[in-house]
Amino acid sequence: MQAIRITRRAATRTLAAALMAASLPVAALAEDTVKIGVILPMTGPSASTGKQVTAAMKLWQAVNGTKAGGKTVEIVVKDDTGVADVTKRLAQELVVNDHVSFLAGFGLTPLALAAAPIATQGKVPMIVSAAATATITEASPYIVRTSFTLPQVTAPAAEQAAKQGWKKAITLVTDYGPGIDAEKTFKERFTATGGEVVAELRVPLKNPDFAPFLQRVADTKPDGVFVFVPSGFGGLFVKQFVERGFDKSGIRLIATGDVLDDDLLDDMGDVVLGVTTTHHYSAAHPSAENKAYVAAFTKANPGLRPNFMSVAGWDAMALVYAALDKTGGATDGTKLVETMKGMSWVSPRGPITIDPATRDIVQNVYVRTVEKVDGHLWNVETSAFEAVKDPVKAAKAAK
Ligand code: PHB
C-alpha cells in the first residue's frame, strides 16, 4: 500500500519525528498536531456516505501512519445528519474553536455549499470528498475535490446509450444539483448522437417514491431510461423498478454508478445482472492498488465493501498528507491549496490529478456491467475513458 503514497520518505520522516518528539517540551506537542475536521452525514438517509468515507480515512491512517510533514494528523469527525444548517455550524465551530487546518467530507451538495463561505473566511482548505455537483468548486477558492462531478460520469453514459442503439430515452433523476447536472449532460450528449430525450423526470430528494415516475416511463415506452439517484438511494430505486416488471419490459436501463453503488449492489439481486453504468470507481477495478485497498478495507470493516465514496475519503487523506509533506508541515491554508493544485497520484480507482485550473479531479471514467463472480455481484469494468475532466468547466475554459 505504501506505493500509493505520493512522496514518502517514511524511514527518514519517522526518525525525524521521533527525535523531535523526544526533544520537545509537552506544551509544544499541540502545535505538532494538525487537525482535519470531517463533516459528514453519519445518521439519516445518507449515513452510508459517512460510514464509507470515515472508514477509508481511518484505514489510510492505519496503513500509512499518522505523520505527515513532521506533524501528527488527527481526524475529528462530526455528524451533520444531512442538514445544511448543521454543516455550517459545525464548520464554523471546527475552524474557530478547534483550529482545524482542513475541512473535509460533505456528503451532499447543499451541505458542501453551506460550508463553503466558512472555508473562504477562515482560509481553510475544504476537501470535498463526496458531493458532486459541477459548480461546487466555484463556491470557494479553498475547495479542492477528490470525488467526481456528475457531468464527468454522465457524458459516457449518453454515449453508451447511443452505442446500444437507443433512439428515444427518458431521464429520471433526483431533483437537486447533481441530478440536474446529470439530466442536462445526458440530454446534451444523447441529442448530439441523434437521439431524443422524450421526457425529463425529477424525483424529490426527500422520501422519494419512484412508482409514479416509473409509470410515466412505462406509458411512454422509450428505448431506455437513464437514471441518477445519490448514493444510498439505489436500493429503493431498483426495488420499485423490479416491482413494476421493468426488468422484463424491454425498456433498458443505463445509470451512473451512484445507482448500482458497491455499498448496496450485492443485495440488489440478479435482476441487475447485465445493467450498464458509468463511474470513476468500482470495487472490482482490477489494479494492484485497488486489490490491496479492497482487501485492507474489508478486513478492517467486515461485511462492508468499499464504494466510490470511500475511495474519495482515501484520496482526501492522500492529498492532505502529500500537501503537508510538501509544505514541511506548514498549515497556511492558501499555501496548502496552491500546493495541492496539479498533484497526481495513483488511487485505487486509477491515476488521478487535481486540475490546477479548477481544483476538480481529473480521472478515468469506466463503463461497467454487472456480473456475478464467485457468487457475488460486481460492477465489472469493460472499457475506460481516460483522464476525463469535468466537461462543464472544460467547455467554459475553451470559450
Ligand atoms: C451530491 O449531493 O452532490 C451527491 C451525493 C451522492 C452522490 C452524488 C452526488 O452519489
Image: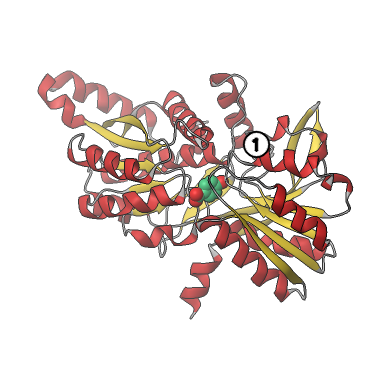
- Quadrant of res 360: bottom left
Going by the numbered disc 1, the residue's amino acid type is Asp
Q: Mark 1 Cα within 10 Å, few/some/many (few <14, many 20+)?
A: many
Q: How far across and down, in percent of the image, does residue 313 sit?
A: 47, 38
Looking at this view, is 377 or 46 the one in front? 46
In the rendered view, tell whether residue 232 sits above or below residue 134: above
Rendering coords of residue 82 (x, y %): 43, 40
Left/right placement of residue 2 relative to residue 265 reads left
Q: Position of residue 166 (x, y in %)?
A: 82, 65
The quarter holding residue 221 reads bottom right
Q: Which residue extends farthest bottom?
A: 399
The number of callouts visible is: 1
Q: Nearer the viewer, residue 140 or 61?
A: 140
Identify the coloring. secondary structure
As helix, strand or loop, the secondary structure at mark 1 comes to loop
Left or right of 200 on screen, residue 38: left
- Decide if ligand 1 comes within 8 Å of the CB at mark 1: no
Question: In this orientation, does residue 151 appear?
Answer: no
Q: Is residue 331 left or right of residue 171?
A: left
Residue in the image at 81% along x and 26% along y: 375
Query: Eyeballing the image, is 282 above or below 394?
Result: above
Give the residue drawn at x 42%, y 51%: 110
| Residue 276 percent location from the top left of the image | 76, 50
Give the residue displayed 64% in from the left and 45% down from the top.
209
Q: Which residue is mark 1?
A: 262
Whether residue 315 can be seen here: yes
Side (left or right) of 87 relative to 71: right
